[in-house]
Image (cartoon, rainbow, N blue to C red):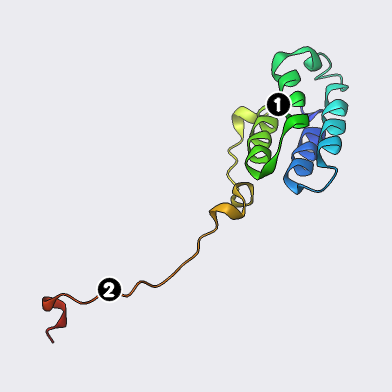
Amino acid sequence: MGEPNSEINASVAAIRSGHADWQREALNHLGRAAATDWAGSCSTLPEYRALTAAIGEARGDEGRVRLIHRTEAIHSFASMISRTRRRDIGAFTTRKPRTEAVPFTPDQRRP
């Protein structure tokens, strides 16, 4: 049952990397996952076909994050695994702390 999962995880890693050739690499891993005995017929499923099409069309960090979650969803143990990773969110949500100067109220100024 877990046979295709190593390739699915490798596909997620390729998507997460965002390197120049991530789409080809992710699709290759998904193809190998689909070729396993357990997942053999998954390449005909609408979810799988929609995912592979979306990988080819994805642009930008937000698109990659969506693909990560969609790819993780086809993992055979997806219903049993909870995945939340800050690195999936990307730099656009990085906290940028700053100090705001706010005057004290009269009550706060009293010793």
Q: Which mark is residue 102?
A: 2
Q: Quadrant of residue 63?
A: top right
Q: Quadrant of residue 39?
A: top right
Q: Which mark is residue 22?
A: none
Q: Label 2: few (<14), some or many (≥20) within 10 Å?
A: few
Look at 81% across and 28% down and name the residue there: 4
The amino acid beneath tag 1 is Ser
Q: Earlier in the sequence, mark 1 or mark 2?
A: 1
Q: Quadrant of residue 28?
A: top right
Look at 60% across and 41% down and name the residue there: 83
Disc 1 vs disc 2: which is toward the camera?
2
Residue nearest the viewer, comparing 54 with 8? 54
The amino acid beneath tag 2 is Val
Q: CA distance from mark 1 to mark 2?
A: 53 Å
Q: Quadrant of the C terminus?
A: bottom left
Q: Is residue 22 left or right of residue 46?
A: right
- Taking 87 as reference, is 11 above or below it? above
Q: Secondary structure at mark 2?
A: loop
